[in-house]
Image (cartoon, helix red, strand yellow):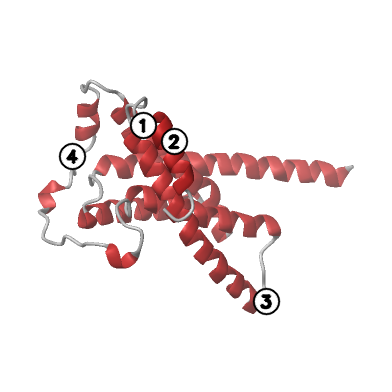
């Protein structure tokens, strides 16, 4: 770790033997540490880009771009690039049998309901939904088009790319259910975005009438 090593060591010595799913906490901290590193790179590139363009976004829209970038980087670190810090450390496994990809809808998700712990079930279903709500909430503002169709299609493509990379890099289980739950999350996020968008429009209209 480059940034969070002291925090990780403190949490490890304090909670490692007391938390059943400490591996998940470790994954989150490592992913967050890597996200900070690559987000700094994004910030440098973005600032250089802003120096050369004439038509700039509003402050709110630009803030959404930065938050969206941080979110996407964190999402990729949590789901795809779990075991590596730098690109040259990646190991590709193109020899894998495509039969290992689950294309039977809800097959694996239903299996998780019969396990001893329901944590895996909720993480697989609710967790995948929650992780893509920020996508549906931020993406329309980033592209400056509030259309559900584009948001859902791009969200589905991102989810499919994540599942494909997980398969090639062997960093996760590639499952059609994950794509479904991710798309549900993107839709929910977009609905929240529309509610906020309409609320702000009504608020501004009321303010202009006064």
Q: Can residue 73 be seen in this view?
A: no
Residue 186's spot in the image, x, y percent?
45, 44
Residue contact at pointers 1 and 2, CB within 8 angstroms = yes
> How many neighbours does mark 4 have within 10 angstroms: few (below 14), some (14-19), or many (20 or more)?
few
Disc 1 is placed on an element classified as loop
Q: Which mark is residue 16?
A: 1
Q: Distance between the residues labelled 4 and 1?
A: 36 Å
Residue under pointer 2: 11
Disc 2 is placed on an element classified as helix
Please tell me which of labels 4 and 3 falls first in the chain: 3
Residue ID at (54%, 60%): 143
Which of the 4 image quarters holds residue 16? top left
Please tell me which of labels 4 and 2 falls first in the chain: 2
Residue ID at (13%, 47%): 100
The nearer-to-camera label among 4 and 1 is 1
Which of the 4 image quarters holds residue 29? top left
Please tell me which of labels 3 and 2 falls first in the chain: 2
The nearer-to-camera label among 4 and 2 is 2
Residue under pointer 3: 54
The nearer-to-camera label among 3 and 1 is 1
Residue contact at pointers 4 and 3, CB within 8 angstroms = no
Q: How far apart are marks 3 and 1 (CA)?
A: 51 Å
Residue in front for this viewpoint, 152 or 179: 179
> How many neighbours does mark 2 have within 10 angstroms: few (below 14), some (14-19), or many (20 or more)?
some
Q: Which residue lies furthest to the bottom in this view?
A: 52
Q: Residue 104 carries which label?
A: 4
Say if 191 sits above or below 75 in the image: above
Disc 3 is placed on an element classified as loop
Q: How far apart are marks 1 and 2 (CA)?
A: 7 Å
């Amino acid at each position: 770790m480059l940034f969070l090593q002291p925090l990780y060591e403190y949490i490890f010595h304090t909670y490692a033997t007391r938390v059943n799913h400490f591996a998940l906490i470790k994954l989150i901290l490592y992913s967050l540490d890597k996200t900070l590193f690559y987000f700094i790179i994004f910030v440098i590139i973005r600032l250089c880009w802003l120096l050369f363009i004439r038509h700039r976004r509003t402050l709110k829209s630009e803030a959404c771009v930065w938050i969206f970038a941080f979110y996407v980087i964190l999402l990729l670190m949590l789901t795809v690039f779990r075991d590596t810090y730098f690109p040259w450390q990646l190991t590709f496994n193109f020899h894998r049998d495509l039969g290992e990809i689950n294309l039977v809808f809800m097959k694996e998700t239903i299996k998780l309901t019969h396990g001893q712990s329901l944590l895996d079930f909720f993480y697989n279903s609710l967790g995948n939904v929650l992780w893509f709500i920020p996508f549906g909430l931020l993406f329309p503002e980033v592209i400056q088009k509030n259309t559900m169709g584009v948001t859902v299609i791009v969200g589905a493509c991102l989810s499919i790319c994540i599942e494909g990379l997980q398969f090639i890099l062997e960093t996760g289980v590639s499952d059609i259910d994950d794509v479904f739950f991710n798309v549900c999350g993107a839709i929910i996020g977009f609905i929240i975005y529309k509610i906020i968008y309409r609320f702000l429009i009504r608020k501004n209209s009321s303010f202009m009438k006064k």
